[in-house]
């Protein structure tokens, strides 16, 4: 009786269960700062996720209230470039929130999946600050500032608001908003509800977001990926590693400021 040859290494590799690399994108989007999502911090992580282990797909686990429009745009552009270079499909899974810049990143995926009560949208741009000229006057303090260039001190919080400065800022915000809208339309043009006004900064829960075309389906990562790639799919997690010293709370003042800023972003969505 002839014994069947044992399968070669190549045969075993070809029969290997498909792999999906799952990238965790949780937190505020901003340049610099530990735990923040930025193009610089995510670049090596995304490079590995798209190239390690010959993945059948890359999944993004998104939970973000947004933040910097520039960093959001850079991260989304990097995801698309890597997806096109490697020909690897991208699935975005929304947890609590993919709003503002978080949604900007989600739109870079080929598919957006959310929970029924996830929050999506907030397609808009916001800028804020404070003004304290009257408080300075009551304290007997005088603001002194010297510039070369008439617009160098625009939006100075210690001086009365200048209508020309405000108008200039609003023009910049409108341009950023336009870039955000262009990105959403370019990625989801044939899916968006043409009769709905989706670009006012409003946000929606997952079920309505699907009906409006802002998301594709309701679901969760594991069952959705198993349905797409088979019950034996291997889901490999990727995440940002915190610096060793920060795990022991050795930058408490900086961490407290970052936390306060981030909480303000989450609070806009009732979280």
Image (tube, rainbow, N blue to C red):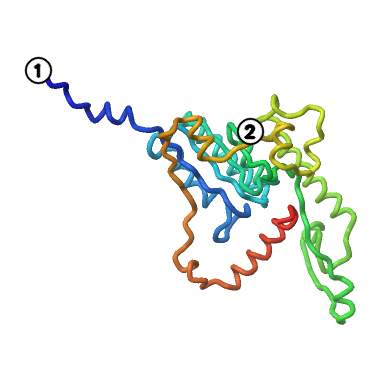
**Residue sitting at x 45%, y 30%:** 230
Q: Nearer the viewer, residue 170 or 183?
A: 183
- Point out the residue furthest to the front here: 1
Q: Nearer the viewer, residue 100 or 216?
A: 216
The numbered mark, 2 or 1, whose residue comes first in the sequence reads 1
Q: Tell me which corner region of the image, top left, top right, bottom left or bottom right, holds residue 210.
A: top right
Q: List the residue tagged with mark 2.
A: 217
Which element type, helix, strand or loop, lies under badge 1?
loop
x and y percentages locating residue 88 in the rendered image: 48, 31
Q: Please give the count of numbered marks on the rendered protein.
A: 2
Q: Nearer the viewer, residue 104 or 267?
A: 267
* Disc nearest the viewer among 2 and 1: 1
Q: Quadrant of the C terminus?
A: bottom right
**Residue sitting at x 54%, y 38%:** 79
Badge 2 vs badge 1, beta-carbon distance below 8 Å: no
Q: List the residue tagged with mark 1.
A: 1
């Amino acid at each position: 009786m002839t014994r069947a040859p044992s399968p070669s290494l190549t045969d075993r590799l070809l029969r290997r269960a498909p792999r999906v690399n799952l990238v965790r994108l949780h937190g505020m989007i901003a340049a610099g700062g530990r735990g923040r999502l930025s193009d610089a911090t995510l670049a090596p992580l995304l490079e590995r996720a798209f190239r390690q282990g010959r993945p059948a797909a890359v999944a993004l686990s998104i939970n973000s209230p947004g933040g910097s429009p520039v960093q959001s745009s850079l991260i989304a552009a990097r995801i698309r470039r890597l997806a096109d270079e490697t020909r690897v499909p991208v699935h975005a899974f929304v947890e609590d929130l993919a709003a503002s810049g978080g949604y900007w990143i989600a739109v870079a995926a080929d598919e957006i999946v959310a929970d029924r009560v996830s929050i999506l949208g907030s397609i808009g741009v916001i800028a804020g600050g404070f003004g304290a000229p009257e408080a300075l006057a009551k304290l007997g303090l005088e603001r002194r500032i010297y510039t070369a260039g008439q617009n160098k001190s625009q939006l100075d919080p210690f001086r009365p608001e200048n209508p020309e400065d405000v108008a200039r800022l609003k023009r910049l915000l409108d341009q950023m908003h336009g870039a955000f809208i262009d990105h959403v339309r370019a990625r989801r043009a044939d899916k968006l509800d043409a009769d709905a006004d989706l670009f006012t900064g409003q946000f929606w829960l997952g079920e309505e977001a699907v009906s409006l075309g802002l998301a594709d389906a309701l679901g969760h990562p594991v069952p959705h990926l198993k349905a797409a790639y088979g019950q034996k799919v291997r889901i490999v997690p990727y995440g940002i590693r915190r610096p060793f010293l920060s795990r022991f709370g050795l930058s408490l003042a900086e961490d407290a400021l970052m936390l306060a800023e981030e909480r303000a972003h989450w609070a806009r969505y009732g979280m």
